[in-house]
Amino acid sequence: MRRIEPDSWAGLAVLLLCVAVGTPTLISETGMRVPRALWAALFVGLLVTLLVSAVCDHRPRTARVAYLLAVVLGWATVLTAPGAGWLLILLVFTATMSAYVLPLWAGPVVIALNTAVIALTLNGTGAPATEAALGTLLYLLIQSATLLSTVAIIREQRMRRELAEAHIDLRAASVILEDSARTHERLRIARELHDLIGHQLTALTLELEVARHHDGAGARKHVERANRVARDLLDDVRKTVGQLRADAPDLRESLTAVVRDIPGLDISVRIDDDVRTTEELTMTLIRVVQEIVTNTIRHADATSLRIHLERTPDHTLKLTSVDDGRGSPDLTPGNGLRGLTERIGAIGGDVHLDGSDGFRVTARMPAR
């Protein structure tokens, strides 16, 4: 089950506070200048449009339209009930929401328009001019403070997300660099073994072969034994060289290193015991997992990610990743997902993407 984040709890608290602010006015009709049914429609419309603008952040156009409607409905709500006490706090919430929906410059514009509405509302109550001016100034300061605080929080969240993306990129690059260094060292040792020992043993075998054809029954037995030893040693060297060239980096260790300590995202990687990969396939899987994690951090708004790599009965490898994020029913792959698909396709595999419930990536590739 998806864990509810602090931002979600905060949004729920704000929604409940909006309801609490407006409900007394709806019940008592205090200070209303329009029929109760009309004012109720304005108030409910304000709550609905604020909620839509909050939950449709992945659809910017819808969120902006809903937010602009909420701003206008907020003005209508307070102007039609100027004597409703704390109802003006609703305009503070609409000003704060601008930080999530509109460009940064639009926030002060909304605050200025809200302040003008607040001034009209307070003057409409018949309050003294000084009291109305102080009230207007107070709400101006509250709006400004909440907007600035929200902008700071959003910037911090963005920086943390960018830090997490850089972290996963650095981890993947570090693992690949380490594996490349190990591969280079194995190849260097393999060449040294082949050049220094293999050639010498070959020469020794040839010399013993020549000696075997010389006279001397007493020496023949030992020469043949030495010949067998030399040939066996030469085979061992060749097998060692072949193994050093063929061994791939440890997949489980590499993937674990890539996804370790990613802030804000709980990641688990499960690899079945019968999974075997070559060096090329391991490098591809590291990059694929890197892209999956980066995509989850950047777009999914998820708290957990589960990755499973298994060998199927038809002798293919199957990688499945599932997060608990918001998903994307109308999926449009970006550069990252297209790159992931191209990497898998380059080794003869295919990728299926599903955003109906969270986000799921299913990749199949030939086992090597």
Image (cartoon, grey):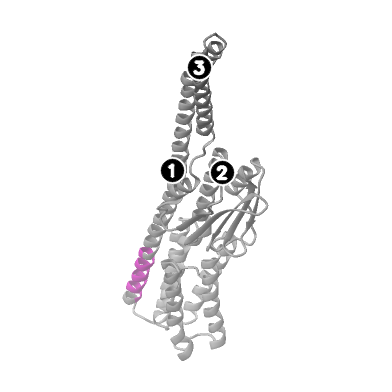
Q: Residue furthest front?
A: 217
Front residue of 362 and 196: 196
Three-letter amino acid code at disc 2? Thr
Q: Quadrant of the C terminus?
A: top right
Distance between the alpha carbons at the discs numbered 2 and 1: 23 Å
Query: Disc 3 designates what residue?
Result: 223
Left or right of 179: which side holds 337? right
Q: Secondary structure at mark 3?
A: helix
Q: Secondary structure at mark 2?
A: loop
Q: Is residue 82 visible?
A: no
367 sits to left or right of 100: right
- Residue 277, which numbered label? 2
Residue at horizontal 49 percent and vertical 20 percent from the top:
226
Q: Earlier in the sequence, mark 2 or mark 1?
A: 1
x 55%, y 11%: residue:
210
Mark whose residue sits in front, 3 or 1: 3
Would you place residue 80 above or below residue 294 in this image? Answer: below
Numbered label attached to residue 110? none
Residue at the disc numbered 1: 170
| Mark 3, other Cα within 10 Å: few <14 / some 14–19 / many ≥20 | some
The answer to whether residue 298 is above or below residue 198 is below
With respect to residue 39, does 249 lie above or below? above
Q: Nearer the viewer, residue 27 or 168?
A: 168
- Answer yes or no: is residue 95 visible: yes
Q: Label 3 amino acid?
A: Val
Q: Earlier in the sequence, mark 3 or mark 1?
A: 1
Which segment is the magenta one? 132-145
**Amino acid at the residue labelled 1:** Leu
Question: In the image, what residue occupies the spot 56% across and 67% down?
Answer: 66
Asked whether residue 28 is drawn in magenta, I would say no
Instruction: Find residue 72 and report its horizontal and vertical position in percent.
Output: 53, 71
